[in-house]
Amino acid sequence: MIKGLVITPPALGRISIGRVVEKNRKRLPEKDDQFTIISQVQTRDGWLAHPLDDSLRQEQGGKIRTIPVRLLFNDPALNFRAEYSLFDRNTGRPLCVGNGDTCKRSTAEGIQSLPCPSPDGCPLAQGGNCKPYGRLNVVIGDDDPLGSFVFRTTGYNSIRTLLARLSYFQALSDNRLACLPLELRLRGKSTRQSHGTPIFYVDLTLRSGISLQDALQQAQQLDQARQDAGFNQAALDAAALAGLHNGTFEDSEEDGGQVLDEFYPDSAISQQNDAMTSAVPRSRQAKPTLHDLILERTRHLPDPPTTAAEAR
């Protein structure tokens, strides 16, 4: 295995609840009230829809509100990886990934493990630079049992709901999460911050029309059938875990570009660049990047403790 390369579940496409529109020559994210299943092919007119998008759209009368899925792994953390993430909004490179306790950060001295105080307490996260960021892999259909579709989100509602559902379903099914018949469901809610306008988030539920008892029975039967056929779910989970731990950052610069398109509007980039101009050396003001800012600040940070005594 190539060291330093994070091996992620094979992806056949993406699932989105928004799209990128062009307004006044700026590419801006726009939320939607439906799912869109996107292929991995892009043309001048944008990303092409996956064939599954059209079939589900016809079944549901024009708008996709639910997607029948299964999961690849029994471990919730393998299906849904969620961390605090900081990207360079000019290049799309991941710069810092943490869990609220520790983080891996790109610094002038290379990749370092440092304390992670969460975005509220981190000076590098000011201005919304660092966000919770989750990637959920799901299987749609039966054509490719290991091919998945990725749903990316920085939404608190989606992240909290998916984390809870995955943990609960794993417990209820006696660690047969990969055998449960599930579906992604789009839900709406209004908050004080939304000023009465509905916001949409993603939930993971049992498939419509299937009771919890029936779903558990189906999971037991599928699990037994897989074992009889020689399917080793524990080994699959172990292989996925080793692949995810093989490198530092899951998202490549290419993936980061898709993150920028979906979650960071051009207006935010302009504001960030204005703020960074006064924070970096004049010799680098011509092309300021968030990476430059991190390197400049981390030069002045104390070295992390290397022993228990230093930590105290």
Image: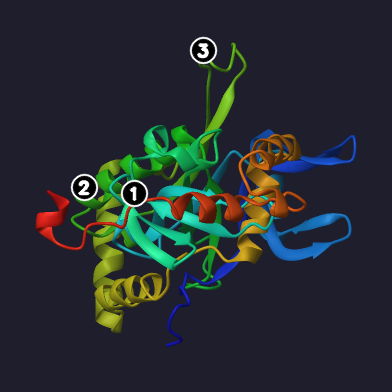
> Which quadrant holds residue 203?
top left
**Residue 285 in the image: x percent, y percent?**
73, 49
How far apart are the alpha carbons under marks 1 and 2?
Answer: 26 Å
Q: Secondary structure at mark 2?
A: helix
How far apart are the alpha carbons under marks 3 and 1?
Answer: 27 Å
Q: Which residue is mark 2?
A: 172
The answer to whether residue 232 is visible is yes
**Foreground tag (3 vs 1):** 1
Q: Residue furthest left?
A: 309
**Residue 276 in the image: x percent, y percent?**
64, 41
Sequence-wise first label, 2 or 3: 2
Q: Amino acid at mark 1?
A: Asn
Q: Amino acid at mark 3?
A: Arg
Residue 192's label in the rendered image is: 3
**Foreground tag (2 vs 3):** 3
Check the image and report above or below for 191 versus 266.
Answer: above
> Which quadrant holds residue 238?
bottom left
**Residue 7 in the image: x percent, y percent?**
46, 75
Q: How many marks?
A: 3
Q: Which residue is mark 1?
A: 99
Sequence-wise first label, 1 or 2: 1
Callout 2 environment at 10 Å: few (<14), some (14 to 19), or many (20+)? few
Residue name at image x 49 percent, y 45 percent: 184
Q: Amino acid at mark 2?
A: Leu
Q: Secondary structure at mark 1?
A: loop
Residue name at image x 34 percent, y 78 percent: 239
Q: Camera-side residue: 43 or 173? A: 43
> Which quadrant holds residue 132?
top left
Q: Would you say the residues marked 3 and 1 are in contact, meaning their CB atoms lie under 8 Å apart? A: no
Sequence-wise first label, 3 or 1: 1
Residue 27's label in the rendered image is: none
Residue name at image x 43 percent, y 66 percent: 111
